[in-house]
Image: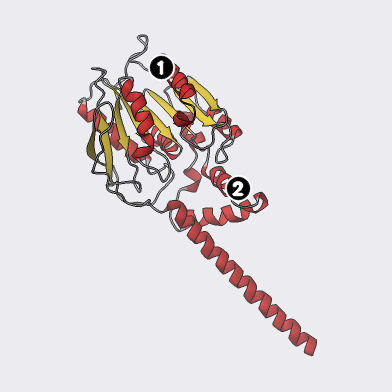
Amino acid sequence: MKSQSIAKKAGKIFLYASGGFLGAFAIGSLIAAWVMVRPGSKRNYDCIDRISFGKLERISLKTSDGIKLHAWVQWSHKTTLKRWVLLLHGYRSDREVMNSRRRFFIRRGYHVLILHFRGHGGSESTRVSYGFNERKDIKAAIEFIRLIHRRQPVEIGIDGVSMGAAAAAYAVAYESINPDWVILESCYDNIRQALENRLGKHIPIPLVPFVARPMEFMGKHVFRLPVEDLNPTKALESIRCPVLVLAGDSEKELKTEEVEKLFQSIPEPKRLVFFPGAEHEDLLVHDPRRFIRTVDGFLKEFSPSQNAGLKIRPVS
């Protein structure tokens, strides 16, 4: 009888301990999922510092789902042509990290539009969706450019970094935008693999699936994150313009085989360039010569305003 009583107490202790562990694990997963989708800190970007090659003009945009966005335009004084580039920052980032490539394109005669995605910088605070809902922000920016030129033929390119690159892929697939060329830098291939790669930097690899799956569940069912749709590799199958894919060969967040898989899904014409020794960072800052040589060559071949054999298409 005494042994049965001890066993019964031990069973209860185990049951309570298991329940407590599972409860704590569920709460931890909920918190981790919220960290994934929570909006960034608001900052005042209305004060614009003096910059090189002209000035930034602040504009306001409104998306098809009613989100208010902060954005900036800089006009290039080196051209009279109607050619633009839309610069798209990454996750938890803002316009300031795009300054190096803003100067790069301004010097080459491209007007620049820098966008703050929803939930970032000075734009309206919403949950982050890793590019999926942010695709509507890109649509709003392109409609703004089209309005300026009143449906005249205009060249529009997109340069997206990390989440910005993924948002460009979704915009092409689901918003029917029609850019003349796209540069995708450090673009994840699908959200599940991207999450596992990031977790693998902080916890032992065998534990990654046990942490990633509950986070996915919480993200999907509590915060309405469209996990199944977060797949740039699939979205890019429908792109119909030249694409330049850039990535570091030493990224922990994005493995070379994942970059190659994403690249294979893209129709021709396309280019793939790895940056030796680069991690998940600004590749223009990491290796300016390689970036400039690569992008200049890509634009010379595929920018309609630089290649006389190409025609500028109406924006759609």
Classify residue 223 by image quadrant: bottom left
**Picture coordinates of residue 140, whole percent (x, y):** 29, 37
- Residue at the far top in the pictured view: 309
289 and 241: which is toward the camera: 289
- Residue 281 versus residue 39 in the image, above or below: above
Q: Nearer the viewer, mark 1 or mark 2?
A: 2
Residue at disc 1, secondary structure: helix
Residue at disc 2, secondary structure: loop
Quadrant of image for the N terminus: bottom right
**Picture coordinates of residue 52, whole percent (x, y):** 28, 28
- The residue shown at (30%, 29%) is 112
Classify residue 56 by image quadrant: top left
- The residue shown at (67%, 51%) is 206
* Residues at discs 1 and 2 in contact (Cβ within 8 Å): no
Residue that mark 1 sits on: 302
**Picture coordinates of residue 18, whole percent (x, y):** 64, 71
Residue that mark 2 sits on: 200
N-terminal of the two: label 1 or label 2? 2
Going by the numbered disc 2, the residue's amino acid type is Gly
Going by the numbered disc 1, the residue's amino acid type is Phe
43 and 316: which is toward the camera: 43
